[in-house]
Image (spheres, helix red, strand yellow):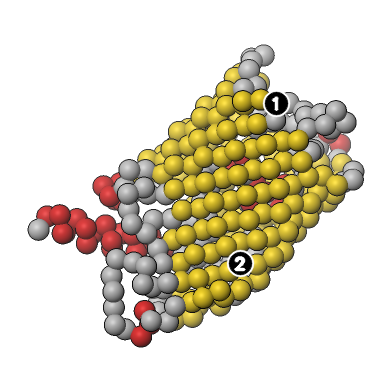
Amino acid sequence: MKLKIQLVIAVMLCFLSFESSAQQDPQYTQYMYNTMNVNPAYTGSRGHLTLTGYHRSQWVGLDGAPTTQALTIESPVGRNVGLGLSFVNDRLGPSDEFYFDGNFSYTLNLNNGRKLSFGVKGGGRMLNVDFTRGTFQSQEDVFQNNIRNRFLPTVGAGIYLHGDKSYIGFSVPNFLTNEIYDEVANSVAAERLHFHLIGGKVFDLSNTTKFMPAVLGKFVVGAPVIVDLSANFMFDDALRLGLAYRWDDSISGLIGLQISPKLLISYSYDYTTTPLQDFNSGTHDIMLRFELRSKERKLKSPRFF
């Protein structure tokens, strides 16, 4: 009986989390290394061709928990233009969403080595909802009406002010409030606008140690504010260690290793601080970043962002 009660509680919490997350974009603990998916104005700012792969398994051990895979490709084109492509696959409960976007940025050179970049992105996502893939079965008609390959266009924009050791940016991932299925109200509902604010600054603690605090804020009309805070250290431009906190959600540990000048691998683990902690073993993120450097486009240091 106790086990059944725990199972019911876990399922209810999962649906409550689904309700609060349904109108949210995918989560990224390592947002500071995956910035183009947060702000299109970041596109091409690294100064050379960059490929980033990302996988996130959230709330491991809980059926229907979110999983996310992302792939981005970006590069400067000419002197002030950046181009990029991003692909994201996000699964949550009975729903699957596949995002695909083209990103464009244009950069103005300011005083003191600072730059101001403007970015836009456009594309779409494919939405699928299969209610047969779940814990409960129901005879209600609403659970028979699966959604298959519904196309939803996306148009977003961002602004990104950055220098050698600091950055701040603001973005709107999608201006279009498409109509999508609302699994809570059992009806068609309008998607809500998202607003993202990012920022970070690098401090030189010694010749071999750098420290960067960073923040990501997500604001959605009618939903709780999500704030991610992180503190990362880089040693000898190779080893990265950090801690992060997502407000009223989780605490995280991060570790990264610059295996070669072109390849970075990074891992993070989230420990859930909500009541869901009793029903999952945490969240795992892993990221691989490959950079095709050239002699003409040498990297400036540090490269936290």
Three-letter residue code for mark 2: Arg
Report the quarter where the C terminus lies: top right
Q: Residue at x 48, y 37 (%)?
A: 268
Q: Is residue 125 visible?
A: yes
Q: Is residue 140 left or right of residue 1?
A: right
Which residue, given by chain and number where applicable, does mark 1 sit on? 261
- Which quarter of the picture shows residue 98? bottom right
Instruction: Give the percent coordinates (x, y) of residue 8.
Output: 22, 62
Q: What type is the residue that disc 1 sits on?
A: Pro
| 300 over 187 or under it: above or below | above
For the N terminus, which image quadrant? Answer: bottom left
Picture disc at residue 100? none
Quadrant position of residue 300: top right
* Residue at point 79%, 38% (across, down): 48
Real-space Cα separation, disc 2 to disc 1, in angstroms: 34 Å
Q: Is residue 250 left or right of residue 107?
A: left
Q: Dots 2 and 1: beta carbons under 8 Å?
A: no
Regarding mark 1 in the picture, which secondary structure is present there? loop
Mark 2: which secondary structure? strand
In this figure, which residue is indicated by the disc labeled 2? 125
Which residue is drawn at the image coordinates 44% and 61% (left, top)? 92
How many badges with numbers are in the image?
Answer: 2
Q: Mark 2 or mark 1, which has the lower sequence index? A: 2
Nearest the viewer among 277 and 118 is 277
Where in the figure is residue 50, as x and y percent of width and height? 72, 41
Image x and y of residue 163, in percent: 76, 35
Q: Residues within 10 Å of mark 1 (few under 14, many from 20)?
A: few
